[in-house]
Image (spheres, rainbow, N blue to C red):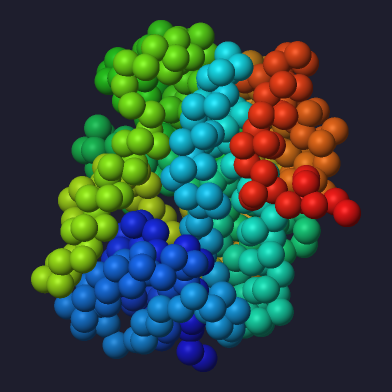
Amino acid sequence: MALKVAVIGGGSTYTPELVEGFLAHSSRLPVDELVLHDIDAERLQVVGGLARRIMQRREWPGQLVLTQDRDLAIDGAGFVIVQLRVGGQAARLLDETLPLEFGCIGQETTGPGGFAKALRTVPVVLDIAEATARHGAKDAWVVDFTNPVGIVTQALLDEGHRAIGLCNVAIGFQRRFAAKLGVEPQRVALEHVGLNHLTWERAVRVDGVDRLHDLIETSADEIGADIESPAALIRLLGAIPSYYLRYFYFTDVVLKEQVSGSKRSRAEEVMAIEKTLLEMYRDPTLAEKPKLLEKRGGAYYSEAAAQLIASLHAGTGDEQVVDIRNDGALPGLPDDAVVEVPARIGLDGATPGRFEPLAPELLGLVQQVKAYERLSVQAAIHGDRAAALKALLANPLVGRYNVATALLDALLEANRRHLPRFFNRG
């Protein structure tokens, strides 16, 4: 049977990375038709043009389709990849700057900025999933790479969709640890546990032997520099936190950095990078992803996405880190809570492993953030202001009623045109 893959948000500058990933895995993932969809016609043509040249250079025999018709893109697709950004980089800039006015960290996936992004994004992705159920191939998968991945995937699974979430943090750690240990990445398996952008590496196994203790002993300072956290914290935890834990462990330090205005926001940096990338993509002689794309973020995205889709398609049963239902993987969390853990990937989806309980200092934070995520889903789906306020109260990076009430009003007003469920209530 012919395999069709649709990319919603195909005008993203990430797309050439994704295309190269599909080409690298073509033996397990023989895509007959790749459809790039975007609401921005110009970006779609520019990015799609580079994608076509990459495919032609690599002599890919399949068909590439560019379209602004979402249902046409999804029609008959076995996999629908979601990599969109509701409101574009302008909305991201608001996510990173507006919270600062209320003494809160500004970040696009964590804290109140991530909350605002979730409110904008969840209804749109659910609509895509509903279209996939109507128009996609039988048993089509929705693969979400759109942040905040944990909240979006929670909404998808709560609403009964055949979906799986994907983040590139784990594969990034795997590659860095493999380089430090002098082994091939495929020999390294992580015990990567927690929630999306709230994870710790509790084991780094090479051919089944845990080398985490060795890494901490020999490279804690270097690893700490990578994640912008001190080696002493890594040694205290006996685990390696993701970069995003910095916002929770060093909230005051990060907030001071952000309000100082000493450097541009990440949104402003990305805007500049994207402008240059799109200019490069317009070059009719360019037929490979440019080196600058590495600075856009999303390192190893193509590898992670292609591996996941290839394994779902071929049912190979290999282990990958994904965002899925807990189903007993992590004690102390409900079965229906979406977690980010290693899982076996087969034709029927991902089956999580079983892991030792999280240490109290990890579990308490995970439970609190999961409560925030569940409330955010409720708020986004129903346009529920009470749930939205409770979500900000549950978020450890807000947590103060007087701040949460004023901040919620400001976030909703700033995002009014993207939040019809809050404002168009008849």
Q: Position of residue 73 (x, y in %)?
A: 52, 79
Residue 265 seen in the current view: yes
Asked whether, in this view, residue 321 is left or right of residue 284, the answer is: right
Write the residue at 67% across / 36% down.
Answer: 413
Count of numbered badges drawn on the protein: 0
Q: Nearer the viewer, residue 425 or 235?
A: 425
Residue 229 seen in the current view: no
Q: Nearer the viewer, residue 310 or 281?
A: 281
Q: Quadrant of residue 379?
A: top right
Asked whether, in this view, residue 352 is left or right of residue 192, the answer is: right
Q: Position of residue 143 (x, y in %)?
A: 55, 62
Residue farthest along the left direction in this orientation? 285
The quadrant of the image that shows the C terminus is bottom right
Write the residue at 31% across / 36% down.
Answer: 269
When the figure is inspected, residue 322 is found, relative to residue 286, above or below; the finding is above
Q: Nearer the viewer, residue 83 or 211?
A: 83
Write the residue at 40% across / 82% down.
Answer: 65
When the figure is inspected, residue 118 is found, relative to residue 49, above or below; the finding is above
When the figure is inspected, residue 346 is found, relative to residue 247, above or below; the finding is below
Q: Position of residue 258 (x, y in %)?
A: 43, 18
Residue farthest along the bottom direction in this orientation? 1
Write the residue at 51% across / 91% down.
Answer: 1
When the figure is inspected, residue 67 is found, relative to residue 419, above or below; the finding is below
Q: Position of residue 111 (x, y in %)?
A: 60, 28
Q: Quadrant of residue 10?
A: bottom left
Q: Nearer the viewer, residue 424 or 264?
A: 424
